[in-house]
Every structure is written in structure tokens, then in C-alpha cells.
Amino acid sequence: MTVRTDDIERARTEVGRVFCPHRLTPQAGVRSVQLRMAARRVGGVGVIDLDYGQAVRIQPPALETFYLVQIPRAGSTVVRHAGHTVTSTPGVASVLSPYDASDMHWSEGSPHRIFYADRRTVDRELARLLGRPPDDPVRFDIGMIMTTSTAQAWARGVAFLADELSQPTEASLFDHPQVAARFEQGLIGKLLLAHRHTHSDLLAESGHHPHPGRLVRRACALISDHHSEALTVGDIAEALRVSVRTLQDCFRRELQTSPTAYLRTCRLDAVHRALRAGDPGVSVTSVAVQHGFVHLGRFATDYRTRYGEAPSTTLRR
């Protein structure tokens, strides 16, 4: 959805259609807005670029079914939510959980990039990370520092999501449902690890397991059998009834690597075999996407590191 309007009532209606009904009030002296909105969504996540152009006050009720991470690209926003207040700037995002109303004052000239995450999708990904369903709802801290390395990595993922969802339908990597699902899980999982919330301490607990060797062997067998499917480390941990932290610790102890790296290696080997076979109509991109690689630039780098040549060179042989 793309919307442009100077009419306050239409702005309130159109933004409410994307998020939820809310109060929109121009600040003193402001008679109109200059709304510019582009909203994109796939599965349980989305990216909305939103700019009112003028200083406004926004008062949504409890969001109920989704979370929002709001990142100003310029200017500032004062956000009151769940009994806390944060002044949000390009270096500090505001994070709204579904359970409380909010009161936000956007300054003039403060375009925002907003990440949307469905509540059920967040709950499901946290259960994968913990190895069990959470006992309580996930409530994020209201202020998210965007200058840390983990937050910046997550923000790059959001930028990639926005770019892919802006492509023509047939040109986006997310046309492939397995790729879209895998990326959604990774992006939400990274957010749960990058920003503090009510279950962060549980995620940080030691991942002790009484039989690490046995667990790793079972995980490796699962990866070998299912690496071409929409498989994430969270899925592996869930299938083995352990937390992601436990799985990571056992891989590090037994194989001196991570389950993510092991899964990537299995997929690289599968791509290598497919490219060497060189079936008619095969392309590097189609094979890479089929085996779960979303970031094609990173795939090409990893492939060259492992095999000493570009994937296109393997295909031509």
C-alpha cells in the first residue's frame, strides 16, 4: 500500500487501516499534514515507511496482535508506553508491545521506518529459542539502542526485507514461501536476541545438556535429511526439545562450530553438487534460493571460500 495525502482525516483512516484505529492530532499551529506512507508485508512481518511531514500527536490503544519497532530517520519522537517514556531518535528506536496504549509526539520532519511483527510469530520464535513455550507474554523494553553491532545487524535485515518487498512480485526472493518463512524467523529471532525483553535472562542462561554428543549427532542427522527445506536453527532445537542456546553450546563443545555454520555448510555442499550436475535450465540464483540462501552476495562469498571458485564457474564446467 502506498498513500499520499494532506488531509488529516484521510491520513488517520489510511494509517489506521495498516495498524489500528487511533487518534491523530496535529500539534498547535499545524492545520494539515503531508502524509507519505509505503507499507509492505509478508507472512508475520512487515516494513512501513511513514512520514506525516508535520508535528503530530498519535494515540493508539493497545495494539493487541502485533509489535512495532519505530526508527526515526531524522527528527525525534517522544513516546510514552507501558508507564515508561523514551525520546526516540535515529540512534534510539521505540518498541511497542501489544499490551498497553501509547501516546506519541512526532516532531516535524521525522520520517520513520517501522518494523511490524505479528504477536503469534514472536511467541512462536521465542518458544524455539527457549526450547519450550514461554510462560508469560513477551514485553520489550521501550527504548532500543540502534548503535550496537547486534542492533545494526538486525536493522540491515529490516532494510533487506523492505527492499525485497518493494520489488515486482515475480522479481522478489520472497516469492519462494520457504525463503520468506526462513527470513521471517531469522529476523524475529535476531530481534529477540538484540533487544532486551522479559525473557532475555532465560535466553542468556547456560545451555548445559547431559549428553551433548548424542544431541549433536541427532541434530546433524536432522540437518542432513532436511537441509533443503525451510529449516532454521530454531526448528532444529524445537524438534530436539532443547533451547537454541543449548544446541549452540553443544555444537561449540563437540564440533567447534555453530549449528548455523553446520547448516550453511550442508547447503553449500548441496548447491555445489547441483551446479556440478548442471541440469538444463539451472541457474546459480535458482539453485541457491532452492537451498535456502537469501543473501546472494554472502552466498557467493561463502561458496568461493569453500570451493575456491565462483558458483558460476562450477556451473560452466
Image (cartoon, rainbow, N blue to C red):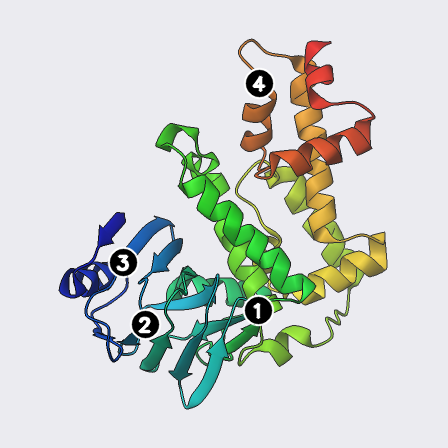
Q: Which residue is mark 4?
A: 283
Q: Which residue is mark 1?
A: 91
Q: Which residue is mark 2?
A: 55
Between 57 and 297, the residue placed more toward the observer is: 57
Q: CA distance from mark 3 to mark 1?
A: 23 Å
Residue at (62% x, 53% y) in the render: 233
Q: Earlier in the sequence, mark 3 or mark 4?
A: 3
Q: Amino acid at mark 1?
A: Gly
Figure check: 235 above or below 127? above
Q: Amino acid at mark 2?
A: Ala
Q: CB atoms at circles 2 and 3 under 8 Å apart?
A: no
Q: CB atoms at circles 3 and 1 under 8 Å apart?
A: no
Q: CB atoms at circles 4 and 2 under 8 Å apart?
A: no
Number of marks in picture: 4
Q: Earlier in the sequence, mark 3 or mark 1?
A: 3
Q: CA distance from mark 1 to mark 2?
A: 20 Å
Q: CB atoms at circles 1 and 2 under 8 Å apart?
A: no
Q: CA distance from mark 4 to mark 2?
A: 50 Å
